[in-house]
Amino acid sequence: MTVQPSVRNLSIDGDRLWDSLMEMAKIGKTAKDGVCRLALTDLDRESRDLFIKWCEAEGCSIRVDQMGNIFARREGKNPDLPPVVIGSHLDSQPTGGKYDGVYGVLSGLEVIRTLNEAKYETEAPIEVVSWTNEEGSRFAPAMVSSGVFAKVFDLEYGHGRADVDGKTMGEELKRIGYLGPDEPTIDAHPMGAYFEAHIEQGPILEDEGKDIGIVTDAQGQRWYEIKFTGVEAHAGPTPMKTRKDALLGAARVVDLVNKIGLDRSPLACATVGMMQIHPNSRNVIPGEVSFTVDFRHPDDAVLSDMDKALREGVEKIAKDIGLESELDNIFYYAPIPFDASCVDAVRKGAELGGFSAREIVSGAGHDACYLAQVCPTAMIFIPCVDGISHNEIEEVHKHWSDAGGQVLLTAVLAKADETVMAKSD
Ligand SMILES: [Zn+2]
């Protein structure tokens, strides 16, 4: 009988993880040392093939579902327990980096490699998943396949997503040989827990000199389209007092949106990112302006309060200038608190490894946000240089990558051996 090594003595091989990241980054490598690996292209297929080759070399069994999500399974002592699943995505933005998504998949593989090397048997099985089309760059929306898995979208919707050339995800999955037979929902494949390690994509961890972000929540979002209609008039003969300037109204809303965000900082984000001015001529008072507002906050009550402040502000500004206003809340995404026991497993992993860590809220969407709706879920963030991502210059220091992998290993083992630990308590 083999003696099980103690969790405390297990450590991932940071060099091996780093080498795999660099090897994967060769597929779709761009001139500026980034990665272009759009979902369901030939390059995406190459990255999938390599991932599967590595997993099979570790003795994993592979399952591909009807959305092309790939699951690599390392059996547990008790195969009837639902697996602890680790994952993220292998697709990238057109000018993406080497770590966004890939880090979560390959650090999952590194957990399996570490356990194999140590001959460590977990109670529950462990699976590593790569979700199809997380980025939403070639096929909108983002996170469509983890969304199908979490039953936010149905299969027909998933397969029907089309790129600019009209090619659908269903057709392209078939073309690259990744239209699997497996039912792509949580019903067919219950999960004990889901962990996703990801780069932060913001500057907070690096600024504060922390190696690990313990992600407690994903922000809620509200997106708006607002239109002001005034009266177009000549910029010369029209006196200031009689003008109905739609752009002046929009400018006041830009300031208001900024204030709404600042008043609720540091957790709130409030942005006007797009504006169209009509007729957009230098000597015409603008008669019509359309623009967008993007609100984010982890607390739904605050998000509602921001909504109220915006609606009241827009109405008042329109009235003051004599404009007509239309306000449309085109998108609402509720804040998601991650599972307390999974978040705790991450926190303990950081403590055990002696890493500096802080709690953090995810400002971006991730596959984990959908998974959190159907199974206990948590995320681990590692810093990225200057907070830059979705950019070819996206960079990570190797000791951050090491730290994230180690925390992931500890957190996953805590969940995979939970039943055993509960028994021995
Ligand atoms: Zn990502």
Image (cartoon, rainbow, N blue to C red):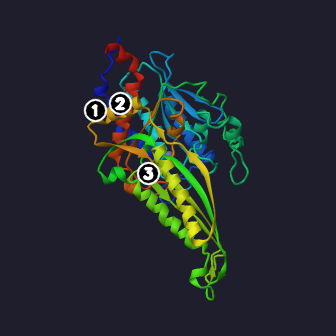
Q: Residues within 10 Å of mark 1 (few under 14, many from 20)?
A: few
Please provide percent x and percent y for residue 188: 61, 24
Question: Nearest the camera: 244 or 68?
Answer: 244
Q: Amino acid at mark 3?
A: Gln
Q: Which residue matches tag 3?
A: 201
Q: Amino acid at mark 1?
A: Leu
Does 2 appear above or below 63? above
Sequence-wise first label, 1 or 2: 1
Label 1 residue SS: helix
Q: Residues within 10 Å of mark 2 (few under 14, many from 20)?
A: many
Sequence-wise first label, 2 or 3: 3
Q: Nearer the viewer, mark 2 or mark 3?
A: 3
Residue 46: which quarter of the image?
top right
Does ligand 1 reach within 8 Å of label 3's beta carbon?
yes
Sequence-wise first label, 3 or 1: 3
Viewed as shown, does residue 256 lie left or right of 343? right
Q: Which residue matches tag 1?
A: 352
Does 252 appear above or below 130? below
Label 2 residue SS: helix
Residue 410's disc is 2
User: Is mark 1 in CB contact (under 8 Å) with mark 2?
Assistant: yes
Mark-to-mark CA distance, 1 and 2: 8 Å
**Residue farthest to the bottom?**
237
Q: Amino acid at mark 2?
A: Thr
Mark-to-mark CA distance, 3 and 1: 25 Å
Does ligand 1 reach within 8 Å of label 2's beta carbon?
no
Mark-to-mark CA distance, 2 and 3: 23 Å
